[in-house]
Amino acid sequence: MTVLLVAETQGSALAPATAKALTAALQIGGGVHVLVAGAGVGPAAEAAAKLSGVDKVLVADDALYGHQLAEPLAALIVGLAGAYDAILAPSTSSSKNVLPRVAALLDVAQLSDIIKVIAPDTFERPIYAGNAIQTVRSKDAKKVITVRTAAFAATGEGGAASIEAIGAGSDPALSSFKSEALAKSERPELTAAKTIVSGGRGLASAENFKDYIEPVANRLGAAIGASRAAVDAGYAPNDLQVGQTGKVVAPDLYVAVGISGAIQHLAGMKDSKVIVAINKDEEAPIFQVADFGLVADLFPALKELDAELAKAGR
């Protein structure tokens, strides 16, 4: 059995999600080949070749894949699919756009957001906002799978895979790139951050988000997240939303401030290693998953926390 792992890239670099999806690919068994497609992705291919367990890296370095348009990338993957029993990708915005097209073109059912590999054809995935775990067995000859990377540790380096350049596939010409607007931030990217400070409806305003959440996040070198309630109220931008309809994160430390803990939010952060909750409502559901909980008014609590972090030299 041979697995094709579609790498996630960030410009010319290999995204951390790839190493986590590789862990799932290795658990399926057999050889693993990694496909790196993009423009100027030589450094990403070299990084993929160093990952332990990778047998070969296929590089499609072409302007056609420079903006990760779903149609040409899906066509490339389908053209390679004949040699593979399973096609995996980390469950990111890009792969959620590409892999359903691959599954449709191959006429198979996609297995989405797997969190555990039980056997080469059997997997676990969360349903109902993570409140139930479904065991799925696929009888399809080819498996098309997205991996919830929060559930898998990253595979380390130690490999020396061969790198093979492949030509670009055909362009279906169903879409074209127009422009993109990328948010710039000095903070860690939310889904890759080791520490996250998230605010909820309890912050009461965008100004309070800036005055209370940002100083603590700055002290901790943390990314900033938000609940859907905070985003819907305009306290924080959409790209900071954590939860079922936002981003799924699994940092070493997740600080939830003024977040009640609705199941939709918990679905996006409950795999965090340590969860700290600050909320004045002692009955808030967030305390059921928190490792440490503080029942307090968040405003003086955050000011005190900021002061203590300053004393500690953070």
Image: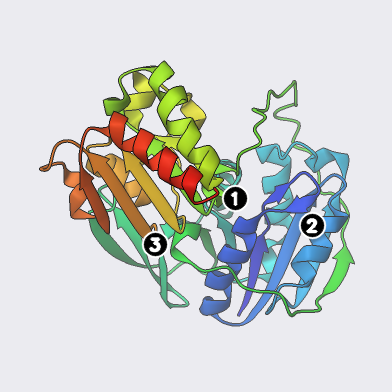
- Please name the amino acid that badge 2 sits on: Ala
Q: Mark 3 points at which residue?
A: 273
- Depth check, mark 3 against mark 2: the one in front is 3
Q: Quadrant of residue 26?
A: bottom right
- Depth check, mark 2 against mark 1: the one in front is 2
Q: Mark 2 points at which residue?
A: 44
Q: Position of residue 313 (x, y in %)?
A: 55, 49
* Callout 3 secondary element: loop
- Residue neighbourhood size for the residue with mark 2, other residues' Cα within 10 Å, grouped as few (<14), some (14–19), many (≥20): many
Q: Measure how far apart labels 3 and 1 are at the Cα level.
A: 34 Å
User: Camera-side residue: 235 or 48?
Assistant: 235
Q: Quarter holding the N terminus?
A: bottom right
- Please name the amino acid that badge 3 sits on: Lys
Q: Quadrant of residue 136?
A: bottom left
Q: Measure how far apart labels 3 and 2 are at the Cα level.
A: 28 Å
Q: Where is residue 50 in the image (x, y as percent from the top left)?
A: 77, 72
User: Camera-side residue: 104 or 130?
Assistant: 130
**What residue is at 32 percent from the left and 57 percent from the top?**
126
Q: Position of residue 5 (x, y in %)?
A: 65, 64
- Residue neighbourhood size for the residue with mark 1, other residues' Cα within 10 Å, grouped as few (<14), some (14–19), many (≥20): many
Q: Mark 2 or mark 1: name the one nearer the start of the chain.
A: 2
Q: Name the residue under label 1.
A: 102
- Residue neighbourhood size for the residue with mark 3, other residues' Cα within 10 Å, grouped as few (<14), some (14–19), many (≥20): few
**What residue is at 67 percent from the left and 29 percent from the top?**
184
For the residues bearing labels 3 and 2, Cβ distance under 8 angstroms: no
User: Camera-side residue: 274 or 217?
Assistant: 217
* Callout 2 secondary element: helix
Q: Position of residue 100 (x, y in %)?
A: 53, 46
- Please name the amino acid that badge 1 sits on: Val
